[in-house]
Amino acid sequence: MKNKRIEMRHTRQRRVRKKVRGTAERPRLSVFRSARHIYAQLIDDVSGRTLAAASTLTASVKGSLGGLKKIEAAKAVGKAVAEAAKGKGYGAVVFDRNGFLYHGRVKALSEGAREAGLKF
């Protein structure tokens, strides 16, 4: 059953990735969610480079998590990646939920990024 679930996520991921491309002006905000942690990256697909990243394991975010629930931690990661993006001069991104449902932690991360001023 688990393999079927992973295969279906990869199918959704490939379907979305056909349409969503990040550029140097408007990078792709890619989200990965594991059982314990959540990761976010800004990716320029043209050059194949990661421009900025944040996760619940990043030192700056990890120190402020102390006892927060997973959804609140995801919101903090969204704010951190948005601050990193704005620090490098990126104000708008393309959101890539990476085959995950736009619900729960993925939604909280995107809301946190929007609150910090990122447009998508």
Image (cartoon, rainbow, N blue to C red):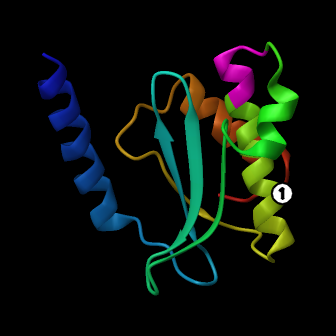
Question: Which quarter of the figure has residue 20?
Answer: bottom left
- Please indicate, yes or no, whether residue 114 appears anywhere in the rendered image: no
Q: Amino acid at mark 1?
A: Glu
Disc 1 marks which residue? 83
* Start-end of magenta stretch: 68-73
Question: In the image, 9: left or right of 100?
Answer: left
Percent position of residue 75, x then y: 73, 33
User: Residue at the location (59% across, 32% down)?
Assistant: 107
Residue 99 spot, x, y in % from top left: 34, 41
Viewer-side residue, 64 vs 100: 64
> Is residue 97 located in the magenta-colored stretch of the structure?
no
Residue 109 falls left or right of residue 22: right
- x, y percentage for residue 70? 65, 19
Q: Residue 57's image quarter?
A: top right
Query: In the displayed structure, does residue 32 sit left or right of residue 80?
Result: left
Q: Secondary structure at mark 1?
A: helix
- Rendered-image quadrant of the N terminus: top left
What secondary structure do most residues of the magenta stretch adopt? helix
Q: Residue at x 67, y 31 (%)?
A: 74
Quadrant location of the C terminus? bottom right
Q: Does 39 appear above or below 103? A: below
Is residue 44 among what the camera can see?
yes
